Image (tube, grey):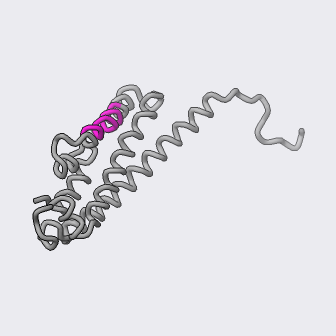
Amino acid sequence: MKNKTLAAWLALMGGPLGLHRFYLRGLTDAAGWLLIIPTTLGMYGVHRAKNFGQDDHLSWILIPFLGITIAATALNAIILGLTSEEKWNSNYNQPMPAETLSGRTNWLTAAALVASLFIGSTALMASLAFSFQRYFEYQIEQSPPTTEPLVKTSAD
């Protein structure tokens, strides 16, 4: 029997490693294994940023992979937590009746939903802010210097 609350918490806490997919679909789930790729790329970007500083161009390309993966799996936790009992049990607990306890929503499920919304939105906004900041800083660094003053004085 697959428990909806456990699946939502696994998606939130171990989603970037595919733990919720392995719990629900088994170790042969290709999408669960594919989640490890952007997570690893993002962690490598964080590692490069720590070692080479924020001016490392490859790190500011790789770090958003981690943030977007965290946000996507948090969204998946929300979807899993909001699945109706009947649909949950028909998808993951097939031989069991529709009113089986494992598909019910409880306070722990609601806590997973709130935490998923908070963590997912924070990860997404942080990834976007970091990416755009580094992109625009790079654009300013690459622009040619100007010789004209930005503010005209009364003597001009």
Residue 120 shown in magenta: no
- The residue lying at 78 percent from left, 42 percent from top is 151
In the picture as drawn, the residue positioned furthest to the front comes out as 95
Image coordinates of residue 93 in percent, x first then y, are: 14, 61
- Range covered by the magenta-colored residues: 33-44
| Residue 59 sits above or below residue 101 on the image | above
Quarter of the image with the N terminus is: bottom left
Image quarter of residue 3: bottom left
In the picture as drawn, the residue positioned furthest to the bottom comes out as 99
Left or right? Give the position of 12 relative to 102: right
Closer to the camera, 106 or 82?
82
Image quarter of residue 104: bottom left
Image quarter of residue 65: top left
Closer to the camera, 137 or 78?
78
- The residue lying at 20 percent from left, 64 percent from top is 90
Residue 37 shown in magenta: yes
Image coordinates of residue 152 in percent, x first then y, are: 83, 41
Image coordinates of residue 117 in percent, x first then y, are: 34, 60
| Residue 7 sits above or below residue 129 on the image | below
Closer to the camera, 68 or 153?
68
Left or right? Give the position of 149 relative to 28: right
Q: How many labels does the image show?
A: 0
Q: Is the magenta stretch mostly helix, strand or loop?
A: helix
Quarter of the image with the C terminus is: top right
- The residue lying at 39 percent from left, 56 percent from top is 121
- The residue lying at 10 percent from left, 63 percent from top is 95
Image coordinates of residue 77 in percent, x first then y, are: 28, 57
